[in-house]
Structure formats: structure tokens, C-alpha cells
Amino acid sequence: MRRSSTLAGTIGICLFLSIGAFAGDDLAEADRLFALGGLENFQKSIPIYAKAAAQDPGSFEANWKSSRAHREYANQAKRQDVADWKKICTEHGKAGMQYAQKAIDLQRTSPTGTITTASTSASIRTG
């Protein structure tokens, strides 16, 4: 009995750690795209950051970076005068706010989440 519970615990820990590793891989890929900059790369990074946040909902990093990607995509759409940029700003501003709020809820004392929320909020107002 004790051996099976130890085995189950070990398997559980391995699964938990592997989920974190997959989320880390996604964050690295999204970070790479985000660092390249530009409308298309920001847009491509959004679902990857979202996947990382879904795989690890307790990840402050995945949530605030997802918020940042939404904000930058909306800002670039406006700067480039993309068709429907106002709609893009509204949709991505709201999505970014949701991720920023999750980040704040995870780390209330971190200025990163608060700053991201404020700048994302500005994207909604200007969109």
C-alpha cells in the first residue's frame, strides 16, 4: 500500500513538472517571436502565450507576457492603421486586461503586472 502511494506521488510530481516544462518551452518560443517585433510576430506570439498560461495558470510570467503581447499587437495595429484597428484595440485590450488581472492576482506586490494593466487599459481607451 505504501509503495503504491509513493509511486502515485512520484508520477504526480513528474506530470506536474512536465507540464511546467512544456509551458516553459511555449514561453521561450513566444518570447522569441515577441523579441522579433512587428505586427505579425506579436500576433503569432499571442496564442502561444495563452497556451502557456492555460498549461500553468499559476504562472505570473505567462499571464503578464500574454497581456503584453495583446497590448503590443493592438498598439502596432493602430500605428500601422490596419483595417479595423479600433476593433483590434478593443478586443485585444480587453483580453490583455484579463491576463494582466490574473498576473496581479498572482503577485499583488509586483509592479510588472500593475504597469502592464495600466498600459493595456490605455490601449482600450485609445482604440
Image (cartoon, helix red, strand yellow):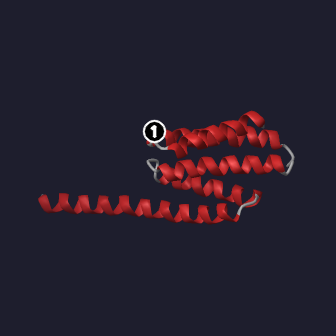
Q: Which residue is mark 1?
A: 108
From the image, which quarter does the N terminus lie in? bottom left
Q: Along the horizontal axis of the image, is 59 left or right of 16?
A: right
In the image, residue 33 above or below residue 89: below
Q: Along the horizontal axis of the image, is 46 left or right of 78?
A: left
Q: Along the horizontal axis of the image, is 4 left or right of 49?
A: left
At 54% from the left edge and 61% from the top edge, which residue is drawn? Answer: 27
From the image, which quarter does the C terminus lie in? top right
Describe the element under mark 1 as helix, strand or loop.
loop
Residue extending furthest toward the left: 1
Q: Along the horizontal axis of the image, is 119 left or right of 106?
A: right
Looking at the image, which is closer to me, 67 or 57?
67
Residue extending furthest toward the top: 125
Residue 116 place in picture, x, y as percent:
60, 43
At 60% from the left edge and 39% from the top edge, which residue is drawn? Answer: 117
Q: Kindly identify the amino acid type of the residue bearing the numbered disc 1.
A: Arg
Residue 89 place in picture, x, y as percent:
75, 41
Looking at the image, which is closer to me, 76 or 49?
76
At 82% from the left edge and 49% from the top edge, which residue is drawn? Answer: 79
Residue 65 place in picture, x, y as percent:
58, 52
In the image, residue 65 above or below residue 109: below
In the image, residue 74 above or below residue 9: above
At 60% from the left edge and 62% from the top edge, which residue is drawn? Answer: 31
Looking at the image, which is closer to me, 68 or 11?
68
Residue 76 place in picture, x, y as percent:
77, 51
Residue 49 in which image quadrant = bottom right
In the image, residue 44 above or below residue 83: below
